[in-house]
């Protein structure tokens, strides 16, 4: 079994980290650079920054934040939110991001995946997929889960891989925020059908949930936000427990 990764996620609005419930009641959670440094010190393997702001200055604000994070961080980090063109990616990578994440823009124009993989390499292209199980069929959703599509999760994931994505970040909307565990059945099926790494997202509430998604869901990495932000789970404690459970992690 390859080493499993623990990935905290930070939502960024206008250059600040925010916390919210179901995308509303957002409140300031501090400086992203300071939080990133804290998580790196605590043993996070990677970080994900998702820009949820929509100001005209967004690109400049995000690029400046990426530059500041890159200067002070010694672990890889992914940046997503509003990326829809090769130029967007170019700016973020030049400012120090290791990977970028695209979601709605990939569904609206799938060729974007091919273009980004060809120019920058698959290793830095993550495609995020938000999906919900409706009458036994996993349907892909866009715009933070607000817009349903007819796309099937597994078919879209296979297409994403064929087009050159290096990794998939799968969020189960049914599990997100529930703290009842990850969507391990869907994750295991994705793992069976794909040859690229899969990051599990949505549902982390206990240390056991992380163990379950690595063993039963066969996820390569597990992403969480609130359990880390609110210090309900300390990353170092989590990794020590996973190691005791026989799951290979970087301590």
Image (cartoon, rainbow, N blue to C red):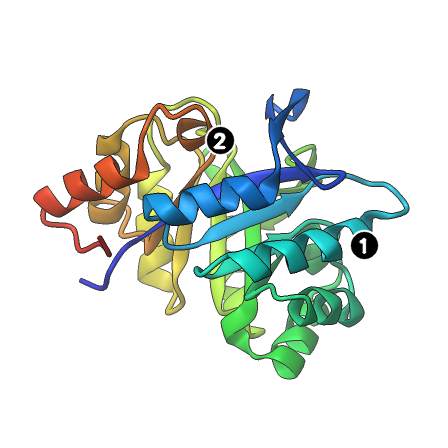
Give coordinates of residue 173: x percent, y percent: 52, 33
The answer to whether the residues at label 1 and label 2 have Cβ atoms under 8 Å apart is no
Q: Secondary structure at mark 1?
A: helix
* Residue depicted at 17% across the width and 55% down the height: 248
Q: Label 2: how many residues lie within 10 Å, few (<14), some (14-19) or many (20+)? A: few
Q: Which residue is mark 2?
A: 135
Foreground mark, 1 or 2? 1
Q: Which residue is mark 1?
A: 59
Q: Secondary structure at mark 2?
A: loop
* Residue depicted at 73% across the width and 51% down the height: 62
Give coordinates of residue 29: x percent, y percent: 59, 27
* Residue farthest toward the bottom in the current orientation of the protein: 118
Question: Which quadrant is home to the N terminus?
Answer: bottom left
Q: Is residue 173 above or below residue 4?
A: above
CA gap, disc 1 to disc 2?
Answer: 39 Å
* Residue depicted at 40% across the width and 67% down the height: 196
Left or right, 152 with respect to 28, comes to: left
Would residue 212 be seen by someone viewing this image from the given angle?
no
* Residue depicted at 40% across the width and 56% down the height: 198
Left or right, 237 with respect to 164, comes to: left
The residue closer to the viewer here, 176 or 194, is 176
Q: Earlier in the sequence, mark 1 or mark 2?
A: 1
The residue closer to the viewer here, 11 or 85, is 11
Q: Quadrant of residue 149?
A: top right
The residue closer to the viewer here, 15 or 186, is 15
């Amino acid at each position: 079994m390859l080493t499993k990764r623990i990935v905290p996620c930070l939502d960024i609005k206008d250059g600040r980290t925010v916390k919210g419930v179901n995308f509303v009641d957002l409140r300031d959670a501090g400086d992203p650079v300071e939080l990133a440094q804290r998580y790196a010190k605590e043993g996070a393997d990677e970080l994900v920054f998702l820009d949820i702001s929509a100001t005209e200055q967004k690109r400049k604000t995000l690029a400046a934040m990426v530059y500041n994070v890159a200067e002070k961080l010694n672990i890889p980090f992914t940046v997503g939110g509003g990326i829809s063109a090769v130029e967007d990616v170019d700016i973020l990578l030049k400012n120090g991001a290791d990977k970028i994440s695209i979601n709605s823009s990939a569904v609206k124009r799938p060729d974007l995946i091919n273009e980004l993989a060809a120019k920058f390499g698959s290793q830095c292209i993550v495609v995020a997929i938000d999906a919900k199980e409706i009458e036994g069929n996993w349907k892909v959703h866009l715009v933070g889960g607000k817009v349903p599509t007819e796309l099937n999760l597994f078919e879209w994931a296979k297409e994403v891989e064929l087009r050159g994505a290096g990794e998939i970040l799968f969020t189960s909307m049914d599990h997100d925020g529930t703290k009842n565990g990850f969507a391990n059945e869907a994750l295991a099926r994705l793992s069976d059908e794909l040859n690229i790494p899969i990051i599990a997202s949505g549902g982390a509430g206990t240390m056991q949930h992380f163990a379950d998604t690595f063993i039963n869901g066969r996820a390569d990495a597990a992403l969480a936000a609130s359990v880390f932000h609110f210090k309900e789970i300390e990353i170092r404690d989590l990794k020590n427990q996973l190691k005791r459970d026989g799951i290979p992690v970087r301590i």
